[in-house]
């Protein structure tokens, strides 16, 4: 199972025993899960049985999950992190191009 997991990016470390119940499985992540990554994760995977709480991923779906559940979940968390990284890089590039065009258009340097 471990060989199937992604080597870089967010990892699921284990089940938070103190905060998990029969209805909610709280999964500790490293790094802690942010709302931004969680929102992109939900957008990518299109699954509604998750929540985020105190930096952890919370599964509220059926508890009869398959053995590959953690690997799939980690892979989609990593996809979310990568998508956010790409979005930020694209936004920085677009801003830079825009500012360069404006500087040339009005004949002022970027400082």
Image (spheres, rainbow, N blue to C red):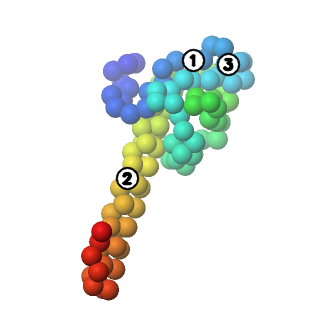
Image point (52%, 18%), residue name: 14
Q: Is residue 4 left or right of residue 107?
A: right
Q: Are marks 3 and 1 in contact (CB under 8 Å)?
A: no
Q: Secondary structure at mark 1?
A: strand
Image point (39%, 49%), residue name: 85
User: Looking at the picture, does residue 58 appear above or below residue 1?
Assistant: below
For this orientation, the residue located farthest to the bottom is 106
Q: Is residue 45 left or right of residue 87?
A: right
Quarter in which the N terminus is drawn: top left
Q: Nearer the viewer, residue 41 or 64?
A: 41
Image point (50%, 26%), residue name: 29
Select label 3 or label 1 by which is in front. 3
Q: Secondary structure at mark 3?
A: loop
Q: Tell which circle, 2 or 1, labels the residue nearer the N-terminal end.
A: 1
Q: Which residue is mark 3?
A: 19
Q: Nearer the viewer, residue 73 or 30?
A: 30
User: Looking at the picture, does residue 83 appear above or below residue 63?
Assistant: below
Q: Distance of mark 2 from mark 1, alpha carbons?
A: 30 Å
Q: Which residue is mark 1?
A: 15
Q: Distance of mark 3 from mark 2, alpha carbons?
A: 33 Å
Q: Which residue is mark 2?
A: 86
Quarter-of-image position of residue 100: bottom left
Q: Is residue 32 left or right of residue 47?
A: left
Q: Secondary structure at mark 2?
A: helix
Image point (40%, 55%), residue name: 88
Q: Tell which circle, 3 or 2, labels the residue nearer the N-terminal end.
A: 3
Quarter in which the C terminus is drawn: bottom left
């Amino acid at each position: 199972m471990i060989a199937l997991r992604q080597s870089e990016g967010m990892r699921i470390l284990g089940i938070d025993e103190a905060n998990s119940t029969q209805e909610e499985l709280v999964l500790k992540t490293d790094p802690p899960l942010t709302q931004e990554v969680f929102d992109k994760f939900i957008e990518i995977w299109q699954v509604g049985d998750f929540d985020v709480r105190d930096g952890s991923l919370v599964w509220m779906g059926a508890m009869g999950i398959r053995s590959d559940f953690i690997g799939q979940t980690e892979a989609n968390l990593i996809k979310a992190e990568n998508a956010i990284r790409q979005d930020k890089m694209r936004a920085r590039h677009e801003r830079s191009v825009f500012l360069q065009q404006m500087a040339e258009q009005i004949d002022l340097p970027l400082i």
